[in-house]
Structures are given as C-alpha cells and as structure tokens.
C-alpha cells in the first residue's frame, strides 16, 4: 500500500499542476485504504469542489469533506458495490 500511495501522491501532484484555471480535477481510486483515498485528497493544493448529495444516487451520500466513499456493503441486496474513494477540486 505504501508504494502505491507514494505513486498516487506523485500522480495527483502532477495532475494538479496541469489543471487550467476554472478546470476540475477528479481523483477516483478503487480502494478501501485511507492511504490511497482520504490521505491523498488531504494533500491536494487546489480548491475543494465538494461532491453534493444531489449529484449522487439516493443510496449514496458524500462525506462531510464533500468526498465520496463507497464500500461493498452498499447496495448489498443488488449484488454490492466496489469500494471506491472519489474527490474533486477546481483550479
């Protein structure tokens, strides 16, 4: 996990430099590990663009930071959902 988190941090840092003024950066990872999700998002040097509840299906809700975390337990009756972390920023 540590090696992947280091690579993800470098990718996010570089991608953040490429976002043009008014542009957005979306980071999504298929991982349940905070080191690959929340810890990465906390370091991004752009303006947060929180994900809003009205942008999501009724069964999903953003975190207090405006990020989205899903787990396999969500929608279990319909076969489940993969674990994801998603965050968004604007330049």
Image (cartoon, helix red, strand yellow):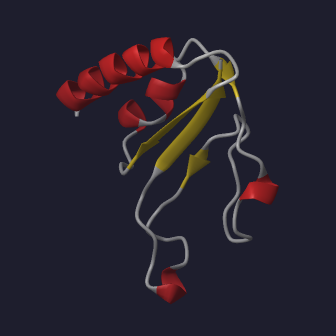
Residue ranking furthest to the right: 54
The residue depicted at 36 percent of the width and 48 percent of the height is: 31
| 33 to 77, vertically: above or below | above
- Quarter containing the N terminus: top left
| Side of 54 where 14 appears, left or right | left
| Side of 36 where 46 appears, left or right | right
The picture quadrant where one finds residue 48 is top right
| Side of 79 where 88 appears, left or right | right
Pinpoint residue 84: horizontal percent, then vertical percent.
Answer: 45, 53
- Quarter containing the C terminus: top right
The picture quadrant where one finds residue 34 is top left
Residue ranking furthest to the left: 3
Pinpoint residue 68: horizontal percent, then vertical percent.
Answer: 60, 48
Pinpoint residue 12: horizontal percent, then vertical percent.
Answer: 41, 22
| 14 to 50, vertically: above or below | above
The residue depicted at 47 percent of the width and 16 percent of the height is: 18
| 49 to 17, vertically: above or below | below
The residue depicted at 37 percent of the width and 35 percent of the height is: 36
């Amino acid at each position: 996990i540590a090696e992947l988190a280091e690579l993800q941090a470098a990718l996010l840092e570089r991608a953040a430099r490429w976002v043009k003024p008014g542009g957005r950066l979306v980071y999504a990872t298929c991982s349940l590990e905070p080191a690959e999700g929340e810890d990465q998002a906390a370091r991004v040097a752009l303006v947060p663009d929180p994900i809003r509840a009205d942008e999501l299906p009724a069964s999903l809700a953003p975190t207090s930071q405006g990020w989205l975390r899903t787990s396999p337990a969500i929608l279990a009756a319909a076969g489940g959902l993969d674990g994801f972390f998603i965050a968004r920023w604007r330049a």
